[in-house]
Amino acid sequence: MAEKKQARLTKVLDYLKHDDPFSKGVAFCPGCGLELLLRFIPRVLGNDIVITGTPSCSAPVLLGQNNQSWHTLSYFGTLMTGAAANATGLARYYRKAGIDNTVVCFNGDGTANDIGFGNLSGAAERNEPFIYICYDNEGYMNTGIQKSGTTPFGATTTTTPYGSVHKGKNLRRMNLGLKMAMNKIPYTATATLSDLEDLARKLLKAKEAKERGFCFLHVFAPCPTGWGADPANTIEICRRAVKTNYFPLWEAENGRIRMTKTVKKPKPVSTYTELMKKFNHMTEADIKILQDDVEYEYCLLGGLSVLEAECQLPVSAKDQGEAS
Amino acid sequence: MSSNHYFKHEGPWSDAGDPLMCTDTGDWRTKRPVVDKEKCIFCGFCAIYCPIQVMEMQSDTHFEANLDFCKGCGICAKECPKGAITMISEGEFVS
């Protein structure tokens, strides 16, 4: 214990160039992944961003309560059905007025994948110049932990309970990131909280790519309250989700998928599911279904990223991809 | 009523003069992170992973939690590569 004080600070702190616009005591649950993400975004992108958002766990804090605010950012609260459409209006206004600004549409997976997906899809088609960030906590946590489209197979929520009839959710989860990458938008990426350097790099890349059009970030943010996990395990859950390929990290520029982190020996998905109560009831057979699903999605992703290297795209499409 | 006497940090409600709302999240805590200054190698992992961002640098030697706002989730203790942070029950500190 003699030679120990080498001041070798983590590189992530270099990315945190700006002040934290939030007040210290903010009403999020202890160990909330969303709070870490929400404080991280303006510290990387700058405090001059405009956030638009919808009713979600982030809304009470972003919108403020009782005529008072929790933060110093600009926020525009909208309905879940029109999240991306409102951000479109803001982004177009700033473009027409000649104001250099970053519009961040910050929503949960319920808005992005279920209720507001039509808008999101439309904004991606029109290639609107803003950043859409979906924090994925795999359910409607703010209203009392209901299942959403990204809730994985077997997870218990209040609408897919475990009992004599139902054994948790019996449907597979949807892969939102891949769906958006298929739209060939300038930038799509998945990120998680265990690898903050990767997240910061992707945020900055999105800010740059926003000049060319729509950017989509899918961030995996665990909810200790809703998942029945120990708050101390929030980061560990993210780490294991990456290590088991449950949530692979990749990015796609103009629809070209590239893995940003490849796991050499993926661990079985049971090392991930054991950390939380929502998977407690799952039998070997159930875990097998989830494992197959994870492997299927990873194979799909791997195939697409290999395809990029091996498959010769038609010249016209290639030129278009680089120009747009 | 211009001031709130119940909480140390909670501002008077419905007062536009008060810039930011702030809750005493420190009193939610049941366990307190205690940093072992000898073991701390000043890597900063506790500071970046803390959701509330309360791990503050103490003169380039170690990190210390701001106990006014620490919610006691225990992420810092879990993520510390040297195990320098222990979560100790708040009951131990009641005098």
Image (cartoon, grey):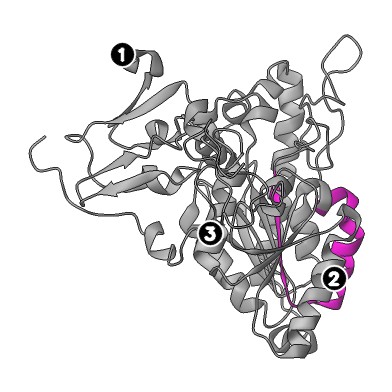
The residue under the point 71% across, 25% down is A287
- In which quarter of the view is residue A147 placed? top right
What is the x, y in percent for residue A278? 71, 23
Q: Is residue B29 left or right of residue B12?
A: left
The residue under the point 86% across, 53% down is A80
The residue under the point 70% across, 33% down is A291
- Placement of A208 over or under B62, stated as above or below: below
Question: Residue under circle 2?
Answer: A123
Residue A109 lies in the magenta stretch: no
Dot 2 and dot 1 within a common chain = no
| Chain identity of mark 3 | A
Residues marked 1 and 3 touching at CB (< 8 Å): no
From where the camera sits, is residue B43 visible? no
Residue A127 lies in the magenta stretch: yes
- What's the magenta region? A112-136
Counting other residues with Cα less than 10 Å from the Cα at mark 1, is it few (<14), some (14-19), or many (20 or more)?
few
Looking at the image, which is closer to me, B77 or A184? B77
Which three-letter amino acid code belongs to the residue tagged 1? Ser
Question: Residue under circle 3?
Answer: A21
Dot 2 and dot 3 within a common chain = yes
- Placement of A101 over or under A215, stated as above or below: below
Q: CA distance from mark 2 to mark 1?
A: 59 Å
What is the x, y in percent for residue A22? 54, 54
Question: Residue under circle 1?
Answer: B95
- In which quarter of the view is residue A308 placed? bottom right
Q: CA distance from mark 2 to mark 3?
A: 28 Å
Q: Is residue A151 left or right of residue A295?
A: right
